[in-house]
Image (cartoon, rainbow, N blue to C red):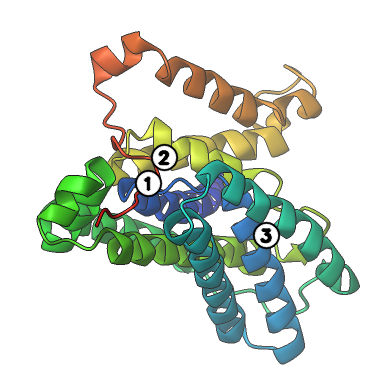
Amino acid sequence: MQEFLIRSLDASTIFTIAALGELIGQRSGILNVGVEGVMLFGATLGFITATTTGSYMLGFLLAIAIGGLLGLLHGFFSITLGGDQVVSGMGIWILGFGLTTYIGSPFAGPLGLPRIPSVFGLSPFFFLGIALTAIVWFVLSRTNLGLRIRSVGENPVVAEVSGISVTKTRYLCVVTAGMFMGLAGAIFSLDYNPVWAYNFVMGWGFIALALVFFSMWNPIILIGGSLLFGSLWQVSLNPQLLLPDLMSRYIWRTVPFTITLVMLLLMSTRWFRTKWGATKPEALGQAYVKEG
């Protein structure tokens, strides 16, 4: 049972950090459905770098850098060109799915490095996830930068008139978001499950995307949702530990994604928005073109 709890907390860390990145981007009005693709790039390039150099630090740094570059690419299509944000995000996911398979195949197998030391039995990234959640909450809720981010996500026209650069603010957010996603992917491949395999992120990016909506764009609620889905994922891997002989493990593997779908459908209803006050940024997914 102790191992189950630890692995659940470790899994929740990855969901938390990836979803925090997406939350930052969405609060500025930029939707990135390519979270999975960014995580795949971060996981694969981080794994390759750590394998070839023997350095975890370089692996994490490269993963963060590639995540930031992909965020910049998404920003170029979505902000500068004013393109469809969903199409751009899907393009990043498809690119990540195909390209990481090609470049990662020669490195398939275990990482071959000593495991990252735990802290009180937990991954050190669990504590990083808590710290990042607190920082993101504080920045968005209690700082002028957070006010600018929320302003461009709600009404970019008014924000621009007030002297806020919508373009600069959104670029800052999408690059930061990409860095978080790249880091989450590296944590998956270098700490949580240090074995490279084809498409090994297994849909975690889409769960992270759903968590942002589940959290109603609140970082504190988000970390609670991450703990829930981290536990559900571990149950799906080893259901006999808690619920012996109830269902096949293959059916359990679908449970996190089924719950994700049901939750998104529920949150799309007028009843849920009215009762619980989901605070979706008004300009989310909308391109902004500065007039004059």
User: Pointer 3: residues within 10 angstroms few (<14), some, or many (20+)?
Assistant: many
Q: CA distance from mark 2 to mark 3?
A: 19 Å
Who comes first in sequence, dot 1 or dot 2? 1
Placement of the C terminus among the 4 image quadrants: bottom left
The kind of secondary structure element at disc 2 is helix
- Report which residue position mark 3 lands on: 40
Tag 1: amino acid: Gln
Q: CA distance from mark 1 to mark 3?
A: 20 Å
The circle drawn on residue 212 is 2
In the picture as drawn, the residue positioned furthest to the bottom comes out as 53
Tell whether label 2 touches label 1 (CB within 8 Å). Answer: yes
Who comes first in sequence, dot 2 or dot 3? 3
Q: Position of residue 23 (x, y in %)?
A: 38, 48
Left or right of residue 188: residue 15: left
Tag 2: amino acid: Val
Q: Position of residue 145 (x, y in %)?
A: 18, 62
The kind of secondary structure element at disc 3 is helix
